[in-house]
Amino acid sequence: MTKYSLLAGSVGLGLFALLWLLSVNQQNIVTRGIDAYEYHRPIFGGLTQAQEIVITRELRGVGAILVNLRRADNIPDVHVSITDIHTHQELATAIIPSASIQDDQFTTVSLPSPLVLAQQNVRLTFAARAATSANPVGIRFHPDDPYPAGSRIEKEMSQRGDLALLLLERVPLWRYIGTTISNHRELATMLAGATLVASLITALASRWGWRRQPQRQRLIELACLGLLALTGTIVRFFLIPQFHGVSGGDPYNYLFIAQKLADLANPFEGVKRLPGYPLLLLPTLVSSIDTQWWMRALSALAAGGSIFLTGLLARRLHFPWSVQVIAAVLLIFQKDFLWTSLRPEPYTLYTFLLLLALVLFFNLHHRAAQLAFGITLGYAAMTRQEGFVAAAILGIFALIFWRQIFRQEAPTGTTPWSRLLPRRHEFTLLLRQLSWSFLPALVVVSPFFIHNTLAFGNPFYTPYFEGERLQIVDSWPAFQDSLGATWGILSSLWRPSWDQLHRIPLNDPLFITGFILTLLWWGVQQVPIRTKHNFLTPLVSGLWLVLLFATLWVAIVHRSIFNHFITTITGGMLLASVIPFIYAGRWRAVIVLTVGFAQLLVALWFHPFAKHYQQIYPLTVLLLATAIVAPRPKQVSLASSAVSLTSRDIRETLLAATSRISALTPLVLVIVLLLASLKPEIDEYNQATALDWVVYRAVRLAEQHPTPTGFDQAYLPAQFTFGNHAFYFSSEDEHTIAQEQQWLEQHSIRTLVVTNHTKAFRELGASWQLIKSFRSEGKDEFMFESRVYVRPAP
């Protein structure tokens, strides 16, 4: 190992020397100023703006944040001069063309020749002599202390402070790196945190030291998955109170079904949705639990369970521990999965049930697992219509792979085809096992089939086939459009912004690069390193580290390039990971992929919204984790397969660690960037649901006051809470104040809820007492408000 250590040391010293000897151009930002109108100084005619600076390195150019201060049709060029403070000698001049001036951005200009000065004081002067007071050029600045605009102190301070300047300098590479990180301190901190998290995930996935006690090892691994699931659940419970109101009518549709269940009425009559999820909403009807909070809490708990089951499913597929950990960690904050898991709808619950059914499916050789599988599969089908598709596919695969699933020994001396068919004495056993596995599911869903048979004459009928507003695929162009929208959703999974649709062309060079690199990395990993001294391992590890630093650097300096880069590369990785997934999981992976693909087709066929793919996201992160680790079939972790590590083990571990950190860091960075912008996204959501929120709170308060209760409009929260026990004023029609008063007297209204969404009940008599008003949050010009009035009994 000595000569390879010397080789690695020599390469390290060479890289260190490059940091000192190699010089590059850098942008040194002196200050960015303050982005407000009052913090811009005018430049026109003889009025110039100047600032003294000290040049310590070779100066190649200068820049400033210039603006069109009065929004004139055109502004003149800006002249920049650099003069020596002591000798007043003009050292250099340059012209900033007006066409290059853009608001809120540095406009730079190169000097005709570099200024090679050492610790010399110079004055930078900006002039626009062709400009007038009607069309001045503004230059941003940062005062010593910002004061309110227009105040006396602010006017006195307007001549003090630094201009928003940028210096283009020639510096050693090591200083360039330090300055760039300093200029992007917040992003660099995120990058460092993302790298640290990726390293910790890799270290956790290695699980060194557990290899001597397999039973303890399994318990520790399950405990780690449980801790990750708990983390995801806690994060969601922390976010739930920040959501105000619900979007659309679907949550109330499920609540209306829950009311039918509470009244022992037929929950299938007149509705499209199934009663599995509404059944869990019954506690809110018999207690004071906040309905919207409870619905989101169910989704949060289901998300935590899905995180745990994703790792457990990887375990059932015989994937190594590293795949289990990486998949679970990535799923915690995957953007579309996180956002949908905070919705008060059944998508995340169905995801949990489907994953649980898949985990149990690979454990059907136990009688208890067969019963649990049947009940889970049936309840999944009663939660979302896609569950029926999953049940059909798993039933087919149970017949195809019945020997592997039920752990039956194949008879010797037979062909593969004859092994598939059960013999006479095996047929009864197979029928019994299939009955224990699938009959409970049939019992759970039987009310659905019975209702359809009686109401429509077809047990498989569903109102969804009627179409209405859904995008039913009834033509080839419609199919292409839905397919493109589906790929747009799946390819946006690691987009560093919260938008949910970004289509990546399959012929994009970056996409093809990601696809090819993923397959190359997987191919390299399948070839074991057999030689004792293998120089390729440190070389490949070094290349992975170079790729990591290059990715981080692009993320710091060129954010927009990074956003496109990571989204497109990940799209290629996702598509290519199907091959290593099938190779490592064999027939089990084929089953999982088929179920996932069928779920995808259902969403594609009806309505390709991101929430309809919630059950697909755990499988996508499982695919990415498989691509990153590139496991071999039934691979056992390196640390658990040997008591002592050999030199070859160390080299393979080094290669695996560097590759996984390099691949994980950009994905974790995307998560960090998304979480940093989550609060504005929630605020935007709350603005969209503001009316529902103010009405919902008013309704909960109105419940505590005398009836009859009246509303200025038939709002969904009011209809759910009061139903026919309240009165709703038809505020859409033209009406007079006298008609309002007549309506109030006609129905003897004692409690009245009104909003500024309508023009009704703007003038109430003195007999009405305002109990409380609820106002929406946000910065919109129009903010919704609801008011609760009570009229004492006569």
Image: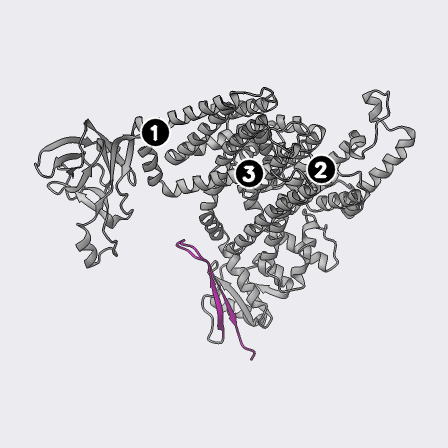
**Residue 13, image x and y in percent?**
38, 26
In this view of the protein, which residue sits in the foreground, 738 or 186?
Answer: 186
In the image, farthest residue toward the front = 2
Q: Quadrant of residue 597?
A: top right
**Residue 519, image x and y in percent?**
57, 23
Residue tagged 2: 390
Residue tagged 1: 19
Relative to 652, is 640 on the left or the right? right
Q: Residue at x 66, y 32 (%)?
A: 641
Dot 1 amino acid type:
Leu
Which of disc 1 and disc 3 is earlier in sequence?
A: 1
Relative to 786, is 525 on the left or the right? right
SS category of the residue bearing label 2: helix
Which of disc 2 and disc 1 is earlier in sequence?
A: 1
Relative to 274, is 477 on the left or the right? left
Residue tagged 3: 203
Q: Which residues are magenta?
A: 768-794
**Residue 40, image x and y in percent?**
22, 46
Q: Quadrant of residue 656?
A: top right
- Asked whether residue 694 is in view, the answer is yes
- Queried whether the magenta region covers residue 781, the answer comes back as yes
SS category of the residue bearing label 1: helix
Q: Which mark is residue 651?
A: none
Tell me, yes or no, whether the two marked residues, 3 and 1, touch with CB atoms within 8 Å. no
Dot 3 amino acid type:
Ala
Q: Quadrant of residue 285?
A: bottom right
Give the answer, above or below, for where 306 lies relative to 763: above
In the image, farthest residue toward the bottom = 794
- Asked whether residue 619 is in view, the answer is no
Marks 3 and 1 sit apart, C-alpha to C-alpha, by: 29 Å
- Closest to the camera, between mark 1 and mark 2, is 1
